[in-house]
Image: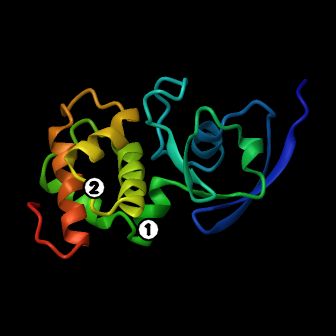
Amino acid sequence: MTNRISITAEVNGESVSRDVEPRQNLVDFLRDELELTGSHVGCEQGVCGACTVRLDGQIVRGCLTLAVQADGAVIETVEGLTDSGEIADLQEAFHNLNAVQCGFCSPGLLITAAELLERHPEADRTQIREFISGNYCRCTGYQTIVDAIETAAARRLGGKGGA
């Protein structure tokens, strides 16, 4: 029998305490314990980006991060970024430009795009493609995703954008 470890974290602005298995990954903790199912489990190797969340302000792969590593941390999921309105412009652009098809990759892509626009608000198409290269999408072919991120970036900089 495995000894459970008590952790406390701030998740989307709320303090959460739970006892977790030492080897439980962060994305399973968020999905199974907190019912925050926006982050998805894809490859379970940190390659696809479907499990991307913010941990203390940095994007991480939830499948490679243990829940116990988040003890005392601030965790933000796509649900939290949606509720705060931080990614509303990205979500609108993704919707308007058909950058969402099955939607499996979208939460990770939205969090990654938010990080990109925070770090590099004037990113060009090449920089956008490079920054999101760790997020796999099997449906869209990336063109519309890049269009949506570029549109949101232009709007943030005061331009009109295409969406």
Mark 2: few/some/many CA within 10 Å (<14, 14-19, 20+): some
Q: Residue 97: horizontal and vertical position, in percent?
A: 12, 51
Left or right: 46, with 121 as reference point:
right
Residue, disc 1: 83
Are dots 1 and 2 in contact, CB under 8 Å?
no
Mark 1: few/some/many CA within 10 Å (<14, 14-19, 20+): few
Q: Quadrant of the C terminus?
A: bottom left
What is the C-alpha distance between the residues marked 1 and 2? 25 Å
Q: Name the amino acid type tagged 1.
A: Asp
Question: SS for tag 2?
Answer: loop
Given residues 63 and 58, the one toward you in this image is 58
**Is residue 29 at least partly visible in the picture?**
yes
Task: Kindly identify which numbered label has been placed on residue 162.
Answer: none
Q: Quadrant of the N terminus?
A: top right
Q: Residue drawn at (53%, 29%), measured in percent from left and top?
A: 46
Given residues 129 and 84, the one toward you in this image is 129
Q: Name the amino acid type tagged 2.
A: Ala
Q: Residue 83: horizontal and vertical position, in percent?
A: 44, 68
Residue, disc 2: 123
Of pointers 1 and 2, the one earlier in the residue sequence = 1
